[in-house]
Image: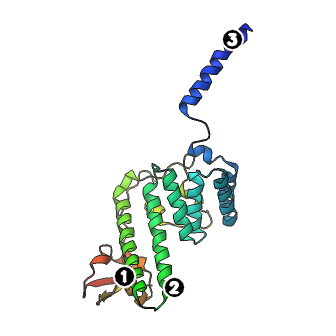
């Protein structure tokens, strides 16, 4: 009985300390220890992306506030599922659950890239139709292009201040890259390795030039030459889609 009285206060003190420092199982590292989450990571390593999406979805069913699972689903939807709408949803849930994450800027750029893909697919669906809806989609596409260019510029100026957190502490982008087939993304291309210096992207060599006519936008010019809008913007780093002038020369890269 005397031994019990001596031990009990120590146990009570340990319990109080635990209560004062927060309940276990609420940190990001604990989210990544959840069985379904671990199963999803394992399936990604084996290139079973459909199975990985199912596992991460189960992890969210178990813990709806699993920011790590939402982030993984966002990356898979964008890179492997070709579903920008789903990627936007999961990225935004991740930011809501982890507003102070170190990769916030990168995730926001990914969201903007997915919105750009949605706008492009909607525009292509209309084909050659005319009318107010087509004009609205063109304006939205140009706005998203400008925002995406601005975000890329911001990431380039951050330099050493932008870094990817360690894989053991947070959901890192590199976890989704399969060794046999590397899939570069706008975010990973802009993050410098330790000790390296970020440099702005090298402009694409121009095959010809084009003089802007009335009513032309980057999207119209790109379609005219059968190239991607991103390639046209990369060949013209200082081009502002909202301030195009008639007669202005733009570089048109080779296909």
The numbered mark, 3 or 1, whose residue comes first in the sequence reads 3
Q: CA distance from mark 2 to mark 1?
A: 18 Å
Residue 5 against residue 109 in the figure, above or below: above
Question: At numbered mark 2, what does the secondary structure look like: helix, strand or loop?
Answer: helix
> Given the current orientation, which residue lies at the most extreme top position?
2
Q: Nearer the viewer, residue 76 or 251?
A: 76
Residue 139 against residue 20 in the figure, above or below: below
The image's mark for residue 121 is none
Q: Identify residue for label 2.
A: 125
Residue 138 location, x and y as percent?
A: 39, 81
- State the quadrant of the C terminus: bottom left
Q: Residues within 10 Å of mark 2 (few under 14, many from 20)?
A: few
Residue 99 location, x and y as percent?
A: 46, 51
Residue 83 against residue 5 in the figure, above or below: below
Q: Nearer the viewer, residue 146 or 11?
A: 11
The image's mark for residue 5 is 3
Residue 124 location, x and y as percent?
A: 49, 85
The numbered mark, 2 or 1, whose residue comes first in the sequence reads 2
Residue 70 location, x and y as percent?
A: 57, 57
Contact (CB < 8 A) between labels 3 and 1?
no
Is any atom of residue 189 visible in this view? no
Closer to viewer: mark 3 or mark 1: 3
Q: Nearer the viewer, residue 205 or 155?
A: 155
Residue at left offset 61%, top offset 43%: 30
Residue at left offset 60%, top offset 20%: 13
Q: CA distance from mark 3 to mark 1?
A: 79 Å
Image coloring type? rainbow
Question: At numbered mark 1, what does the secondary structure look like: helix, strand or loop?
Answer: helix
Q: Identify residue for label 1.
A: 218
Q: Residues within 10 Å of mark 3 (few under 14, many from 20)?
A: few
């Amino acid at each position: 009985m005397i031994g019990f009285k001596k031990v009990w206060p120590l146990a009570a003190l340990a319990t109080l300390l635990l209560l004062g420092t927060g309940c276990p199982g609420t940190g990001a590292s604990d989210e990544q220890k959840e069985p379904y989450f671990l199963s999803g990571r394992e399936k990604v390593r084996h290139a079973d992306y459909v199975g990985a999406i199912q596992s991460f979805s189960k992890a969210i069913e178990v813990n709806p506030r699993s920011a790590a699972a939402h982030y993984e689903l966002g990356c898979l939807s964008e890179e492997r599922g070709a579903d920008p709408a789903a990627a936007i949803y999961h990225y935004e849930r991740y930011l809501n659950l982890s507003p102070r994450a170190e990769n916030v800027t990168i995730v926001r750029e990914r969201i903007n890239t997915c919105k750009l893909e949605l706008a492009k697919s909607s525009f292509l669906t209309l084909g050659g139709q005319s009318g107010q809806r087509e004009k609205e989609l063109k304006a939205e596409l140009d706005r998203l292009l400008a925002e995406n260019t601005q975000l890329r510029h911001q990431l380039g100026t951050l330099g050493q201040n932008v870094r990817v957190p360690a894989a053991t502490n947070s959901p890192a982008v590199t976890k989704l890259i399969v060794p046999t087939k590397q899939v570069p993304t706008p975010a990973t291309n802009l993050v410098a390795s330790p000790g390296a210096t970020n440099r702005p992207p090298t402009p694409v060599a121009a095959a010809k030039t084009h003089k802007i006519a009335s009513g032309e936008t980057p999207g119209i010019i790109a379609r005219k030459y059968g190239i991607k809008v991103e390639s046209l913007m990369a060949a013209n780093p200082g081009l502002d889609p909202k301030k195009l002038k008639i007669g202005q020369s733009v570089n048109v890269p080779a296909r």
